Image: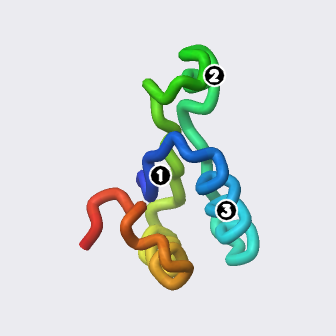
Amino acid sequence: MEELVRTNDVVLISFLESLMKDAGIAYLVADQSMSILDGSIGIMPRRFLVESDQIVQARRIVTDAGLAAELKDRK
């Protein structure tokens, strides 16, 4: 899996989940438990991961949704 986005924004995470579900792209939200442990004060951002063979498609979907600035390693 490859990191698509790293953020503390739970609304963004929820929106990304919806986009990926609609596109049939498998994803994983990593560090969710660690973020809760830090009291949700934003020390530990969550990582939104997708399968390596779907990263290009996922990046395109996020860009098309107007969220290109959120992508890790914007290209």
Going by the numbered disc 1, the residue's amino acid type is Met
Question: Residue 48: percent from the left, percent from the top?
Answer: 53, 50
Q: Check contact, mark 1 vs mark 3: CB within 8 A.
A: no
Residue at mark 2 to residue at mark 1: CA–CA distance:
22 Å
SS for tag 2? Answer: helix
Task: Using a 10 Å C-alpha cutoff, classify the residue at mark 3 as few (fewer than 14 neighbours), some (14 to 19) or many (20 or more).
Answer: few
Going by the numbered disc 3, the residue's amino acid type is Phe
Residue at the disc numbered 3: 15
Q: Residue placed at 62% from the left, 62% from the top?
A: 16
Q: Residue placed at 42% from the left, 54% from the top?
A: 2
Q: Is residue 72 above or below residue 74?
A: above
Residue at mark 1 to residue at mark 3: CA–CA distance:
19 Å
Q: Is residue 21 above or below residue 56?
A: above
Q: Residue placed at 53% from the left, 58% from the top?
A: 50
Residue at the disc numbered 2: 36
The earlier-in-sequence mark between 2 and 1 is: 1
40 sits to left or right of 47: right
The earlier-in-sequence mark between 1 and 3 is: 1
Task: Using a 10 Å C-alpha cutoff, classify the residue at mark 1 as few (fewer than 14 neighbours), some (14 to 19) or many (20 or more).
Answer: some
Residue at the disc numbered 1: 1
- Which quadrant would the C terminus be assigned to in this image? bottom left
Question: Residue 40: percent from the left, percent from the top?
Answer: 59, 25
The earlier-in-sequence mark between 2 and 3 is: 3
Question: Residue 71: percent from the left, percent from the top?
Answer: 39, 63
